[in-house]
Amino acid sequence: MQRIKHGTKIPLNQIILLGIIVLLAGILTYRMVSYFKQVEVQTTQAVLKKGPGIETKDRFTLTQGQRLRVLKTKQHWLYVKTDDDQLGWVADWMLSPSYKNPLDSLSDATIVIDAGHGGHDSGALSNSKKEEKVYTLRYAKQVAKKLRLHGAKVYLTRTEDQTVSLGARPRLAEQVHADAFISFHFDSAPQANVASGYTTYYFNKGPSLKLANTINGHFEDLGLDNRGVDLGDFLVIRDNSRPAVLLEMGYINSERDFEKIKSHAYQNKVTSQVVAGLKDYFHHEE
């Protein structure tokens, strides 16, 4: 076997060629490992879907123990190939307990936005009899639009003036395995014009408290007092195992607050700062 003597110089073109070979081998290995990465179905309820979401059409039911090749991932969904070359999307919570799509940015997240009240439930009233439900929907739609521009998967508990039960709201978050649940509301005091400001509520400690602190920490220059983060015994965040907060973004029966609530400038600031808070929250999630 020929040995390279100590001090012998290797030609530069050979070094470059060797580097290229090593690089190509690494790329090929990475792609093969990624392409042939397999997961196992862990439930009898797993379904192959046409798109990444519970709202998309079913293709067919998968078999418990069936192995699937992962081609790509998106939020809580994997685009897979079966042994008989069928392609489709499957939820990551239907797979091996050890498998979980990485979540380190807003674009990886699934978020439920709850527009409080709706339908026969008007919510609180302003001094001029304007209904809370109108403004919660405006804020919810606006923040949903901004989140989608960042690539997040967003579900709204309601998209129009419709009645949605309190229990259905956290159930949606559970159903889609939401990474965050945000409920929009506007407060009301027993008497008009005696209270002002906005409050961020949580119920469950851990991720929910962290989410509340992170979002509240991004509220600034809103023109109303920040009343901080507080424990709130509200069903939509209490009966919710997902990270969940409820935002009371001003007192609707305060003339000062309502001027803000109904203004486009305030709506834009609030929704942009909620998005910034969520972006920060997911960036620091482990």
Image (cartoon, rainbow, N blue to C red):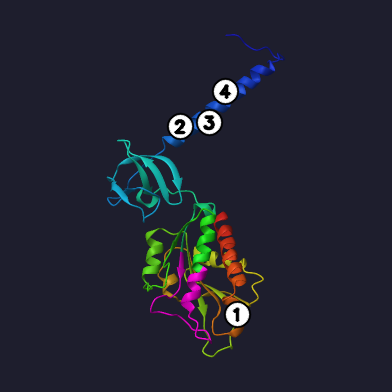
Indicate whether 234 appears above or below 51: below
Find numbered disc 2 in the image and state the secondary structure of the residue it sits on.
helix
> Dots 3 and 4: beta carbons under 8 Å?
no
Q: Which circle marks residue 32 in the picture?
A: 2
Find numbered disc 3 in the image and state the secondary structure of the residue it sits on.
helix
Residue on which disc 3 sits:
27
- The residue at 56%/62% (across/down) is 275
Q: Earlier in the sequence, mark 2 or mark 1?
A: 2
Camera-nearest residue between 239 and 6: 239
Give the quarter of the figure containing the N terminus.
top right
Query: Dividing the picture into quarters, in which one does residue 22 lie?
Result: top right
Q: Earlier in the sequence, mark 4 or mark 1?
A: 4
Q: Nearer the viewer, mark 3 or mark 1?
A: 1
What crowding class fits label 1: few (fewer than 14 Cα within 10 Å), some (14-19), or many (20 or more)?
few
Q: Earlier in the sequence, mark 2 or mark 3?
A: 3
- The residue at 60%/77% (across/down) is 260
Q: Position of residue 38 (x, y in %)?
A: 39, 39
| Identity, as a three-letter code, of the amino acid under mark 2 | Met
Q: Position of residue 151 (x, y in %)?
A: 51, 53
Query: Dividing the picture into quarters, in which one does residue 191 lie?
Result: bottom right
Q: Earlier in the sequence, mark 3 or mark 4?
A: 4
Q: Which residues are magenta?
A: 113-139
Q: Position of residue 44 (x, y in %)?
A: 27, 50
Does residue 154 appear in the picture of this structure? yes
Horizontal relation, residue 85 to residue 230: left or right: left
| Identity, as a three-letter code, of the amino acid under mark 1 | Glu
- The residue at 60%/65% (across/down) is 273
Residue on which disc 4 sits:
21
